[in-house]
Image: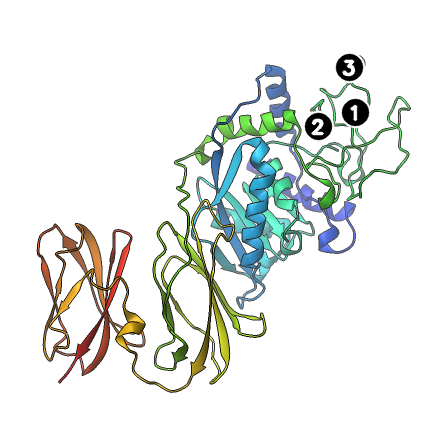
Amino acid sequence: MKQVLITSILLASFLSSSAQNGSIAENGCGTVTTEKEMQDLAAYLASGVAAKTTTPNDTIPLSIHIVGQDNGTGYYKLDNLFKVICDLNTHYAPVGFFFYIKWPINYINNSGYYNHDTWSGYQMMTQNNIANSVNVYFVEDPSGACGYFSPGADGIAIAKGCGNPNSTTLVHELGHYFGLPHTFYGWEGGGTPANPEKVTRGAGANCSTTGDLFCDTDADYLANRWFCPYTGNQLDVTGTPYRPDSSLYMSYATDACMSRFSNQQIGRMQSKLHNDRSYLLGPTPSNIGLTEPEVIYPTDSVYANNTTLRWKKVPGADQYHVKITFNTIPIVKQESVTGDTTLLVNFAMQHGVGYKLIIVPLNAKNVCKPVEKVFTYFYSSSTPPLSIGDMEENSGSITLYPNPTNKSAQLDLSSVSTGDYTLQVTSINGQKLYETVISHRGGSQRVSLPVESLAAGIYIVRLTGNNNNWTEKLMIQK
């Protein structure tokens, strides 16, 4: 069985490269629907099962893999990713599907996967797939196609050039993932079906036994990308002129033409999810409204002795999309998605140059850039001490005493809820000096900090746990 599936994947690559010409953005789909999948579809349609009504939407996790070259360059843009996911959910709303990102985003540095043939793509997916989610890989060139669904490896590969906002490539490949063939099934790669679908519906129709087997999708013989409206003069086997439906996502019409799945296609995808891919269904992630994050450091400048940027936790945020650009030029110098509320700057900033810090809070069900914090700062190569206001977070939630101190300090947990917490002491420039786990069971528990060996100066004490994050400054004088 595995050999059959691998052969199907290899055939998909050959057919795609044979049928398509031009740039990657003009290339089509490398998916080949197997005979077994068509048999399953025929059995589903013959059963007369009504389309499932989903109320509310079925929520489906996406594991996102962004593939770069060996040296970590060439990544798919996160701005594009989040816009594509937002658009995806608009396209799939009539189906009753809602896709959310299963964190974290996985980065893969492998030039052989970045531009891959079908066998390398199969290896990429089998080595990196995350269980119980839809695995989507963004690469430079997925075997010469715009994208494909691999039935053997059970993953989807998308070309960066076909993953721009307003592209329907991911919409199309997910259709394959949930059991849909092309509307022009049988014509791929220049083939001609032995029993082509007729234009007519009703008496004399053969739409339920050939083509894509759906009678609410028009006959379609166009296996190359085409612009709408169709202006050709092809005839079906009865001599009847045909007009393929450019609005269907599973056709090869260009992106601007596509807008829908047919009712039978929707029923098939819903059945496929609930009968064959029910492992995707789980608890619905919460969708808490997100607010603009508050920056703790910097206040106006970033100094050479502290290049770790900090902001307060946003209630309901799972992750933060963080970017640093030049203040006047939108060139991205650093970008990441992090579940932390800190970012260590990893590039060499220039003295006196202005930079822009952009923080977008995200959660699993909301990546549509609801709010963002844009903060401008300058870099200074000097190393002045930071004031207490630069580093306080949730001031008053924990108490350090004595502070300042010359030999010992204690942390009062009386105002902290019960639970397990991580206690950490760092230098002012972010170097971790001490870390331990505390189990707080209530009451006026006090924890001693081992600060006797620390030199005079300013230190940061951080307590995290139970979705809380408290930070206080500790001053040691000797």
Asked if residue 178 shows in the view, the reply is no
Q: Residue at x 78, y 28 (%)?
A: 219
Asked if residue 118 shows in the view, the reply is yes
**Left or right of 178 on screen, residue 308:** left
- How far, Cα to Cα, is label 3 from label 2? 17 Å
Question: Depth-wise, is mark 3 or mark 2 nearer the camera?
Answer: 3
Q: What residue would you read off at disc 2?
A: 212
For residue 375, above or below residue 206: below
Answer yes or no: do the residues labelled 1 and 3 have beta carbons within 8 Å?
no
Relative image position of residue 302 (x, y in whole percent): 40, 78
Question: Depth-wise, is mark 1 or mark 3 nearer the camera?
Answer: 3
Residue situated in front as seen by the camera: 202 or 10: 202
Relative image position of residue 403 (x, y in whole percent): 14, 74
For residue 388, above or below residue 251: below
Q: Residue at x 88, y 37 (%)?
A: 232
- How far, Cα to Cα, is label 1 from label 3? 13 Å
- Looking at the picture, which amino acid does disc 1 mark? Glu
Q: What residue would you read off at disc 1?
A: 197
**Left or right of 386 on screen, residue 256:** right
Answer yes or no: do the residues labelled 1 and 2 have beta carbons within 8 Å?
yes
Upstream in the sequence, badge 1 or badge 3?
1
Looking at the rendered structure, the secondary structure element under dot 1 is: loop
- Looking at the picture, which amino acid does disc 3 mark? Gly
Residue situated in front as seen by the camera: 424 or 9: 424
Looking at the rendered structure, the secondary structure element under dot 3 is: loop
Q: Residues within 10 Å of mark 2 (few under 14, many from 20)?
A: many
